[in-house]
Image (spheres, rainbow, N blue to C red):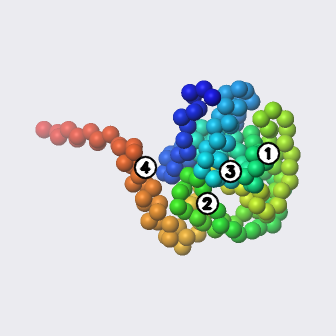
Amino acid sequence: MPAMYEDLQIISYPDPRLKKPSAPVNAVDDSLKELVARMLQLMREHHGVGLAAPQVGQNIRLFVMNHSGDPKDDRVYINPELTEAEGAEDAEEGCLSLPGINANVVRDKTLRMRAVDLDGRSIDQKETGYIARVWQHEFDHLNGTLIIDRMGAVAKMAARKKLRELEEAYEAAHPRPPKPKLLRRK
Ligand SMILES: [Zn+2]
């Protein structure tokens, strides 16, 4: 793996890259394959079910997932589009970019997914339940939406302390430049 991606790590709230809408992938090339390999590695290391490119600081429309933990169930979705939503279901979700926070999120129950895979082939799938839920969670990341944006007011209150801790950790790791001193007019 080239040095370009081997140092990539999962970024956490409130990193601004998580709030940025991602741009379509233009080409499925070797560089993209290397990025996907690193994302799958990080997803496994952190025991995640899915990981979207913005979560490693890459604002492109791509995510990986594995709902079973068996490497042969690795799935890669490039430029995904979700349509034909049916039904609704409420269930708890976590997010690798919001460590320590779980939230109930209402999602569409059944969806159709159209995307491109890592060989550049078209994907056209329909899923119900858990996989459809992962799709929606990861798809949200591509539009800069996190589970805290879909939480109710009460749940957000409950998560406030944890969010503050994440904000403080981010501020400590990314100190802001000192404000320029105001020039006093004579
Ligand atoms: Zn997430």
Tell which circle, 2 or 3, labels the residue nearer the N-terminal end.
Answer: 3
Query: Quarter of the image containing the N terminus?
Result: top right
**Going 29% across and 41% down the picture, which residue do you hit?**
178
Q: Is residue 20 above or below residue 88?
A: above
Question: Residue 127: where, in percent of width, then height?
Answer: 83, 56
Amino acid at dot 4: Tyr
Query: In terms of secondary structure, where does tag 4 sit?
Result: helix
Can you see residue 136? no
In the image, farthest residue toward the left: 186
Amino acid at dot 3: Gly
**Going 45% across and 55% down the picture, which residue do you hit?**
166
- Write down the residue under mark 3: 50
- Write down the residue under mark 4: 170
**Going 80% across and 38% down the picture, which residue do you hit?**
116
Tell which circle, 2 or 4, labels the residue nearer the N-terminal end.
Answer: 2
Which is more toward the observer, 186 or 168?
168
Amino acid at dot 1: Lys
- Write down the residue under mark 1: 72
